[in-house]
């Protein structure tokens, strides 16, 4: 089959199935089209001025068609030679049939064989190649009739342009789909490898660091400093094996490059610190840059409320989840809690941390924020937003 690139180690293919099907179809089309052109030339042989020109042209077409059955490589150079043969065959028609027959609407010598060169250009070089080949053959058609196109000539040119453009578009889409499949398989391999490493690290290093942290806290004194260090390293290593970034890595720009989506996990894990534990998905959670910025600010406001009002020694746990429809951010603390009515009273007194910094930001994105709290039981904040901000009239 046509060798247009190296065989992929992941998909096992050099080209998409549709491209290989087009190439096989063209290998069958060329000999059949040559036979059809020979049949038409035979039926008008007595009216030809120079029959030997037709014989020579048809012989070259036949040799090329049969030769491509043996030479399986399809490159731009091969397509260029085929287009040259098609153009030469078209321009040889007045020599074989005479200008009078051509002016009367006589078929060109290659007839539909020339369309095979346009289709070949589209298969090898995509839509641009197909349209370029169609333009060259169309120019030969116009030159053959001395620039006086008939209705049949215009009809054939339109068909050539559609043939080259549509086949080329189909090939371009198929190749881009194969490239995306390659990236998906590569990402899947990367995730499997990361999961394997994460299991090894979790079963060894992370458990050891967690044990050192617990024992250091229990022993107190100088061991407490070691416990703090172990806890910091445990958090950094968990962030690394989860794919959310390397230890000490600066969070990404939440404005995104040229409006591209950003990984929300990096913004959320940047808030992890002593007293704040963060859990994020293993896969990237891509959202609109505006959503990432507003959620980052809302999470900062929630954690600030924990630090200010949850009480001394209160801890917070942040959980990030997401699916195709949106993302959910849950923040739970073990602080002193509050009566639900106190939140409303705080907003009425001008303390806008809840109503403006959190709920206002979330609702502007088309999402919602809810609080669950009671005295002595801490507080849970659940924020749900779409991946892209909703357009408002």
Image (cartoon, grey):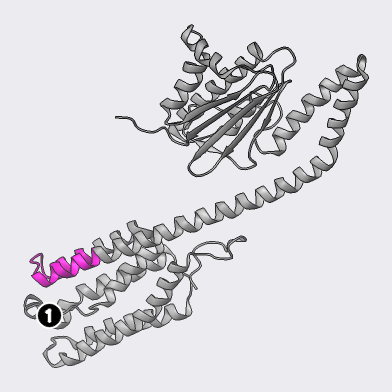
Residue 228 lies in what quarter of the image? top right
Q: Position of residue 363 (x, y in %)?
A: 43, 26
Q: Quadrant of the C terminus?
A: top left
Q: Nearer the viewer, residue 382 or 12?
A: 382
Looking at the image, residue 331 sits to the left or right of residue 297; the answer is right
Q: Nearer the viewer, residue 69 or 102?
A: 69
The magenta stretch is 136-161
Looking at the image, which residue is at 61% across and 49% down? 187
Residue 93 x, y percent position in the rendering? 18, 78
Residue 80 placed where, x, y %?
Answer: 36, 65
Which residue: 41% across, 64% down?
Answer: 124
Judged from the image, the secondary structure of the residue bearing numbered disc 1 is loop
- 264 sits to left or right of 333: left
Please name the predominant secondary structure of the magenta segment in the image.
helix
Any magenta on residue 160? yes
The residue carrying mark 1 is: 106
Compared with 168, 268 (above or below) is above
User: Horizontal placement of 303 versus 369: left or right?
Assistant: right
Residue at image point 56% right, 17% down: 301
Residue 285 against residue 28 in the figure, above or below: above
Check residue 229 for magenta coloring: no
Circle 1: is it few (<14), some (14-19), or many (20+) Cα within 10 Å? some
Residue 381 occupies quadrant: top right
In this orientation, which residue lies closer to the viewer: 381 or 150? 381
Farthest residue toward the top? 349
């Amino acid at each position: 089959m046509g060798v247009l690139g190296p065989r992929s180690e992941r998909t096992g293919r050099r080209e998409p199935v549709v491209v290989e099907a087009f190439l096989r179809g063209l290998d069958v089309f060329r000999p059949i089209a040559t036979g059809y052109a020979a049949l038409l030339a035979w039926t008008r042989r007595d009216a030809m001025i120079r029959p030997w020109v037709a014989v020579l042209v048809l012989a070259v077409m036949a040799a090329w068609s049969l030769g491509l059955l043996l030479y399986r490589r399809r490159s731009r150079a091969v397509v260029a030679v085929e287009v040259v043969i098609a153009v030469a065959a078209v321009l040889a028609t007045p020599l074989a049939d005479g200008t009078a027959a051509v002016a009367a609407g006589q078929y060109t010598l290659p007839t539909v064989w020339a369309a095979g060169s346009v289709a070949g250009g589209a298969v090898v070089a995509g839509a641009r190649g197909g349209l370029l080949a169609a333009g060259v053959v169309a120019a030969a058609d116009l030159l053959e009739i001395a620039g006086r196109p008939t209705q049949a000539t215009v009809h054939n040119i339109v068909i050539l342009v559609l043939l080259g453009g549509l086949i080329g578009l189909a090939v371009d889409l198929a190749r881009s789909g194969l490239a995306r499949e390659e990236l998906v398989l590569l990402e899947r391999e990367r995730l499997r490898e990361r999961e394997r490493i994460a299991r090894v690290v979790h079963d060894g290093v992370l458990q050891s660091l967690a044990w050192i942290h617990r024992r250091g806290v229990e022993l107190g004194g100088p061991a407490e400093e070691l416990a703090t260090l172990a806890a910091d390293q445990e958090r950094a290593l968990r962030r690394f094996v989860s794919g959310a970034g390397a230890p000490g890595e600066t969070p990404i720009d939440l404005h995104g490059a040229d409006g591209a989506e950003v990984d929300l996990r990096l913004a959320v894990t940047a808030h992890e610190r002593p007293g704040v534990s963060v859990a994020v998905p293993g896969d990237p959670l891509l959202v609109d840059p505006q959503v990432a910025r507003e959620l980052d600010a809302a999470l900062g406001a929630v954690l600030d409320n924990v630090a200010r009002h949850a009480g001394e020694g209160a801890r917070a746990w942040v959980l990030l989840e997401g699916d195709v429809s949106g993302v959910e951010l849950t923040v739970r603390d073990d602080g002193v809690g509050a009566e639900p009515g106190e939140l409303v009273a705080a907003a009425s007194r001008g303390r806008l941390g809840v109503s403006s910094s959190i709920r206002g930001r979330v609702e502007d994105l088309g999402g919602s924020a809810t609080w669950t709290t009671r005295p002595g039981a801490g507080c849970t904040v659940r924020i749900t937003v779409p991946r892209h901000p909703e357009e408002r009239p």
